[in-house]
Image: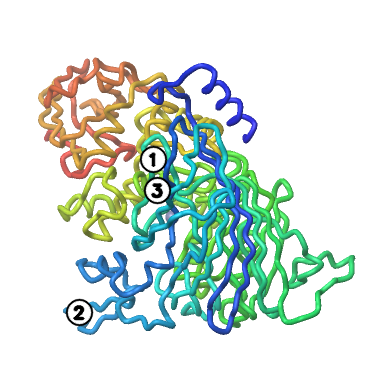
Amino acid sequence: MIKKIIILLHIFLITCSSAQNSPYWQQHADYTMDIDMDVENYRLKGKQKLVYTNNSPDILNVVYYHLQFNAFQPGSEMDLRLQNRPDPDGRMVNNLGTRENPVYESKIAKLKPDEIGYQKVLSLLQDSKKVKVEVTGTILKVQLNEPIKPGQKTILEMDFEAQVPVMIRRAGRNSFEGVALSMAQWYPKLAEYDFEGWHISQYIAREFYGVWGNFDVTIHIDKNYVVGGTGYLQNPQEVGHGYEDKAHKLNLPAGNKLKWHFIAPNVHDFSWAADPEYIHDQTTAENGVVLHFFYKNNPETIENWKKLQPHTAELLSYYNKHIGQYPYKQYSVIQAGDGGMEYGMCTFITGGKNYKGLFGVTAHEFAHSWFQFVLATNELKHAWMDEGFTEYFTNLAQNEILKENNTHPQEGVYSAYYSLVKSGKERPQTLHADKFDFNAAYSISAYYKGAIFLDQLGYVIGEENLSKTIKKYYEDFKFKHPNPNDFKRTAEKVSGLQLDWYMNYWTETTEFIDYAVESISKNNIELMRKGGMPMPLDLTVTYTDGSKENFHIPLREMMGNKPTRSSVLESWPWVKPVYQMRTKKAVKSVQIDPDLGMADTDKTNNFKEVN
Ligand SMILES: [Zn+2]
């Protein structure tokens, strides 16, 4: 993959100098970090060497970093957002009122100086010379001494220190399940620069976007702590804790700390968790991928964590088969954090008292290894492409692996979407993830409306075309930053059908689908499009003699139709709200969308029968 990017870059340098016509490019960042963790006061000191390659066609005079721990300070944008929203995340607030009349108080606003999070840059050198930095909330701006020209590298060396915040959201100390260190968003992380420019949103606890590269991370921590996270441990005999090769002797160093050396190639983030009481199990799954499990020694949940292990191996096989091969050699399921969150080669999840919940969250977060950690979409702008696609596969994998035998495993996502449409609080999926006024509207839009995007696309272009589209999309865009148009073009190339309308209505507007059988008179049927979003239609007609016939009405602007066994009628252009059709026999009843393939918000008018 790295090779391919270099070739692309060469082609770019030789053939063109205009950014508008440039082929795909992406930035590259190689991190080497040495971290000294003090588990008594939750502080760390770090050295970070970053080799940054500017593959863009632009000259860069500045670079930006994220300092995400800074969000956990009174007055931060994360804090202000919590204080000013109608439905704040329950994990981040105290309710001073009642259940019926809640009065919320931001937990961040109450943090004391030794409880807040921070990342402080002590010094920063560009190619051995000191550079000027400026911090605004969770963003660090670096005014470079030397601009980075297209194709050039620069070396940024930083000394930093950080304080791990009290656990409020995703990362922090002492989770409510008693995990000591959940270390996500823990290091100064370079912001991504792409064809749209810099992506430097303040961290308000929602989505992420990172630069592809390689990580070499050494962590010095109290010898009793077990560490799990992104990457491959390079010195298992020097740490033990379940990583060691039992056939060989351990070679533990003297002193109170162990040195953990991890390497993670071709990722865009690095996270880790540590606790002195972790049980560490491992199992080998398909293609020799090692699955690690880190969990607390809690008699109430231990059985579930054991049961989860073969099921996680089945999840790997399921996703490998239906999306594409998992490209790394390990994956770690780690009890940490505050719910479920995906990271490079690992997840932080909570719980375990309810097995179905533990399995479901693992299934979801592991699917993110494909949709986010390999297909690294900008989640802040297109959350539905990672959350929605992940949700879609989670439901299918859970149905198969837990043998739920549900004939419509996505049913739940449709009902959640209908309730959002009814609420009047829906916003277009193209709205930036941070900017949704209601948390619930964001979640349903990203997760459920996003899952319907895929499920319903199967109805629009045919199930076989959908399955081919997903595999081709993964193959063509792995280790890149695909955007909505990349997915649309893949589906168009696979199906030979035009899909601009589908992307536009579904992802950029809040138009909804509602079709109705308006009237039946002998051999004549009149159908009506009542909703703003047009669709191709499947229908079943039952004749007065008891026989049935299936029809398909193509949507004209698709310039074709999905493979179907139904009788294909004349196409329906979107400009016409009404469609008339004539059958050979007298009609008894008409059913629109008999297989529930589309998100028709009012199903009561989808069927009509003559008496
Ligand atoms: Zn997710």
Mark 2 surroundings: few (<14), some (14-19) or many (≥20) residues within 10 A: few
- Whether 250 is drawn above or below 433: the answer is below
Which label's residue is closer to the chain start, 2 or 3?
2
Where on the picture, by quarter, is residue 304? bottom right
Image position, residue 27 (x, y; %): 51, 39
Q: Residue at x 58, y 39 (%)?
A: 324
Identify which amino acid the numbered label 2 is placed on. Answer: Val
Ligand 1 occupies quarter? bottom left
Where on the picture, by quarter, is residue 382? top left
Q: Which mark is residue 103?
A: 2
- Whether 290 is drawn above or below 116: the answer is above
In space, the residues marked 2 and 3 are separated at their CA atoms by: 31 Å
Image position, residue 492 (x, y; %): 40, 24
Image position, residue 571 (x, y; %): 24, 17
Residue identifier under label 1: 455
Dot 2: what SS? loop
Residue identifier under label 3: 379
Dot 1: what SS? helix
Identify which amino acid the numbered label 3 is placed on. Answer: Glu
Where on the picture, by quarter, is residue 84? bottom left
Q: How many marks?
A: 3
Q: Residue at x 55, y 52 (%)?
A: 129
